[in-house]
Amino acid sequence: MSMASTFIKIPRERIGVLIGPKGRVKQQIEEALHVKLEVDSGTGGVTIFLSEGTEDPSVIFRAKEMVLAIGRGFSPERAFQLFDEDTVLQIIDLRDIVGKSESDIKRLKGRVIGREGKTRRLIEELTETEVAVYGHTIGIIGKPEHVQIAREAIMMLLQGSQHNTVYRFLHRKRRELKRRMLEIWEKRENL
């Protein structure tokens, strides 16, 4: 019987974070999702197997997202939000925008982070997402609709929009989300 599996490679310097103190992070992922992680700390390779007796093969993809999130700079605590099936991970690869120029990648990362982290914090607060800027990528974790708004804001910054323009966009989207949530809540109340 062949066991379902998938392979992913993460930066070697993130392997220790994935394994965690005394192997706790790796163990938490394995137990929660009923998978087995085989980690090669020399190459950064991680093979994810379905545990024996696990019926749902989709847990492999959730585990892969979690490993990818940790590999792309999220803390395990932030990556663990992906245990919730309504939470998604999206990765923006800066090389797709500016090629492999280290200086351009660094400049774009700086635009997204902002002075003393202000821009990234604002994006996270106004969209209720988590944002990690690491290596040549920007990762976003959150509810799909919120991740989409955060992605739009980040893409605006990456394409050269003024920070104030992006802040106004985020505040407008935040008001729209709140209004929609209020409408849903009021409909429930009137049922």
Image (cartoon, rainbow, N blue to C red):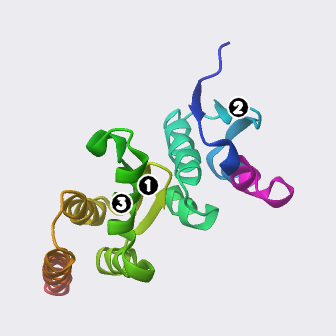
The CA span between labels 3 and 2 is 29 Å
| Residue 79 to residue 44: above or below | below
Residue 104, horizontal then vertical, whole percent: 34, 52
Q: Quadrant of the N terminus?
A: top right
Residue that mark 3 sits on? 107
Instruction: Say whether marks 3 and 2 touch (CB < 8 Å).
Output: no
**Residue placed furthest toward the top:** 1
Q: Residues within 10 Å of mark 2 (few under 14, many from 20)?
A: few
- Which residue sits furthest front? 103
Residues at circles 1 and 2 in contact by the CB criterion of under 8 Å: no
**Picture quarter containing residue 87?**
bottom left
Does residue 86 appear in this view?
Answer: no
Residue 25, how many percent across, how many down? 72, 56
- First in sequence: mark 3 vs mark 2: 2
x, y percent for residue 80: 57, 61
Q: Which residue is mark 1?
A: 85
Was residue 20 drawn as part of the magenta stretch in this picture?
yes
